[in-house]
Amino acid sequence: MKNKLSALLLSFFGFLSTAKSQSSETMASTMRSNGKIYVVVAVLTTIVAGLFFYLIRIDKKVSKLEKDL
Amino acid sequence: MRLSWWKLTAMILVGYAVIGGLLLPVPELTQLGETIRNLYYHVCMWFSMMILYTLSIIHSIKYLNKGNLLHDNKAKSYAGMGTFMGILGYATGAIWASFTWADPNNPAYASFGSIMREPKLIGAAIALLIYGAYFILRNSILDEDQRARVSSVYNVFAYAMLFPSIWIIPRLLPSLHPGQEGNPALNFNDIDARMRMVFYPAVLGWTLLGVWIAQLHIRLNIINEKKG
């Protein structure tokens, strides 16, 4: 299990480093030309929206506890 | 429950920082590349840490003036959230630095370990450790009033130590970290106008988010105290 995890991490960081060496400072223009940055935006928006949803729920629970006191 | 205006503002601004921060144009810089967008996230963590610590010391001084335990409770929660933001700032900075500062041709900056010896990073680590001691100090005193009084005084000291450790000493030493000659993120001549449109709202958004979470903590503590 531990070996698998470290192998996965290693391959991930290895991928990161090759990605870095291949693209010599190519900026947003190329990044957006294949239209995939929006995928990242969607993923991040989902995560942030989920976090806010969770935060609102905790807020509601605390408000309810305050009322019950 | 109706959401108060500042919680809505926090959500809108953080959402804007994520979407606008990724999509809006940024200046093209060698070495930094797209990572300049980290200004909206990494730097905001430190800004909100500083603001939360300021809120914390204000409440500590209020406690020392009035002796109301509620103020000490608030000081603790704001300091906790500030430290959390600081740790996030440190972790994000470590990731950012390892992809922009590392230089295999320069033995002084070839490895991750050599980068992490930056004065600014060590200063930030010292500041966070001083606040870490604040929580240990709190938990080591059993008497409520004594705990509040001692930790409030210590909080004033911890806040004062922020200035030499993160503002003054790192600027006296050579460093790869920007901000040697002033506050590059705040300087109107230094930061690109397009980035300012995202950066300032992002600082406000992340700070309000921190205040929100700290407030939940405070309210839970009040409920616990009333129950117990």
Image (tube, coloured by chain):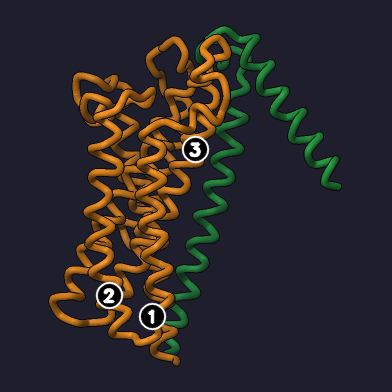
Chain colours: A green, B orange
Residue extending farthest to the left is B65
Q: Which residue is nearer to you in this view: A67 or B203?
A: B203
Residue at mark 3: chain: B
In terms of sequence position, does the residue under pointer 2 or pointer 3 come before the other? 3
Q: Kindly indicate the quadrant of the structure image that contains residue B138.
A: bottom left
Q: Amino acid at mark 2?
A: Val
Query: Do the residues indicated by labels 2 and 1 lie within the same chain of the protein?
Result: yes
**x, y percent for residue B167:** 25, 39
Q: Looking at the image, which residue is at 19% across and 82% down?
A: B67
Q: Which residue is mark 2?
A: B150
In terms of sequence position, does the residue under pointer 3 or pointer 1 come before the other? 3
Contact (CB < 8 A) between labels 2 and 3? Answer: no
Badge number at residue A19: none
Contact (CB < 8 A) between labels 2 and 1? Answer: yes
Q: Mark 3 packing: few (<14 Cα in 10 Å), some, or many (20+)?
A: some
Q: Amino acid at mark 3?
A: Thr
**x, y percent for residue B203:** 32, 41
In terms of sequence position, does the residue under pointer 2 or pointer 1 come before the other? 1
Q: Looking at the image, which residue is at 29% across and 78% down?
A: B148
Q: Which residue is mark 1?
A: B141
Badge number at residue B92: 3
Q: Residue B194, relative to residue B202: is it above or below?
A: above
Residue at mark 1: chain: B
Q: Amino acid at mark 1?
A: Ile
Q: Residue B136, relative to residue B186: is it above or below?
A: below
Q: Mark 1 packing: few (<14 Cα in 10 Å), some, or many (20+)?
A: some
**Residue A26 appears in the picture as rendered:** no
Q: Secondary structure at mark 3?
A: helix
Q: Secondary structure at mark 1?
A: loop
Q: Looking at the image, which residue is at 48% across and 33% down?
A: B116
**x, y percent for residue B174:** 32, 23
